Image (tube, grey):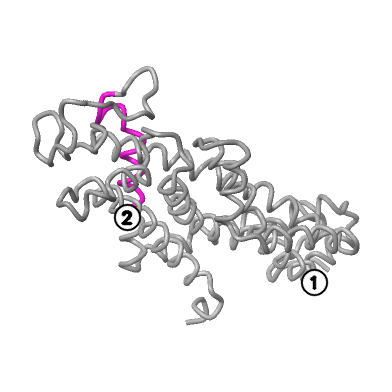
Amino acid sequence: MADLAHPGSHVPGNSGRWDPARTKSRRLGELTVEALKSPTTLAGAIIIVLLIGMAILAPLLVEPNLPDPYQMPRDWAQINAPPGTPGHFLGTTPEGGDVLYGIVWGARTSLRLAFIVVGTTMAIGVTIGSVAGFLGGKWDDILMRMVDVVLAVPDLIMALAIAAVLGPSFQNIILAMVALSWPRYARIIRGQIIHVKGNEYVDVAQLMGDSRWRIYLKDILPNTITPVAVQATLEMGRVVLFGATLSFIGLAEAGLAEWGNLVSEGQQGIVTGRWWVATFGGAMVFLWSLGFNLFGDGLRDILDPRMERR
């Protein structure tokens, strides 16, 4: 019976049993290292490290604007100042905001947005998808219909509706994105659990007397979480891109150090030669999305079974 659990297992009982969590985490680490051998994946990883490093070191790179460091400082005597202006290395916005400050602290805003939204939606989605896939039956029907309803509503319309009710703010952007993003994780984990439940080592665990939730935590979840991790990596880029879109259309508070806000403030200047505000803000959104998409695509490609057989 132990042989059915995993090739090479020879000691029956819990002490000699294959540990899927340890095996899967080791395998994921090996695949990540293999993925980094790809130039595009490595380029994505370098971009991510640089941008996250800038976000973490923001207080050291640019002096915080106290009492609220996430609000850009204003210099009304230097509105629309071009790059290279003394005291404003990347220029200023039409409202006198320092562009360099918006870029650096905007990275911190984006990092905060991505971690909060991705972490929260992944927890919600994995919980709902796990209940649906593991318990099945009426639970699966009810929860998946709820997922279908949320996915049927266009993201932008839902975000606008939430902002109309609660008002424009960074916190409401987070709320809107959490409400919209969790179904993706629920669908992925549900499909993976339904597939893994049919494996022999799950049957062996049942025959050995393990409880249903111990089987889920020890034998099923570790073997279904990898696609969720890849999705989370891709979502880190999508969340910031969508957040910048919401800021651009005015759903964030004025003056927030955020890249979408920079693009919004500088959009009129593009046609009048004041290109720097929108260009620098848009470039940062592009680099963030590019980095996570390159890295996430590399992980996804290397985890494809057809890739593993090469």
Which one is in front in this view, the residue at disc 2 or the one at disc 1? 2
Quadrant assignment for the N terminus: bottom right
Disc count in the image? 2
Residue to which mark 1 is pinned: 198
| Amino acid type at image mark 2 | Leu
Query: Residue drawn at (70%, 66%), measured in percent from left and top?
Result: 192
Query: Residue drawn at (80%, 58%), measured in percent from left and top?
Result: 143
Q: Is residue 12 left or right of residue 7?
A: right
Magenta: main secondary structure: helix
Instruction: Tell me the distance, in whole angstroms, between the alpha carbons under discs 2 and 1.
Output: 41 Å
Q: Position of residue 149 (x, y in %)?
A: 73, 60
What segment carries the magenta color? Answer: 46-63
The 10 Å Cα crowd at callout 1, few under 14, some 14 to 19, many 20 or more, is few
Query: Residue drawn at (40%, 48%), measured in percent from left and top?
Result: 248
Q: Is residue 128 magenta?
A: no
Residue to which mark 2 is pinned: 287
| Amino acid type at image mark 1 | Gly
Label 2 close to label 1 by CB (< 8 Å): no
Query: Residue drawn at (75%, 53%), measured in percent from left and top?
Result: 128
Q: Is residue 180 left or right of residue 218?
A: left
Q: Quadrant of residue 225?
A: bottom right
SS under mark 2 = helix
Q: Position of residue 132 (x, y in %)?
A: 80, 59
The 10 Å Cα crowd at callout 2, few under 14, some 14 to 19, many 20 or more, is some
Q: Position of residue 92 (x, y in %)?
A: 20, 36
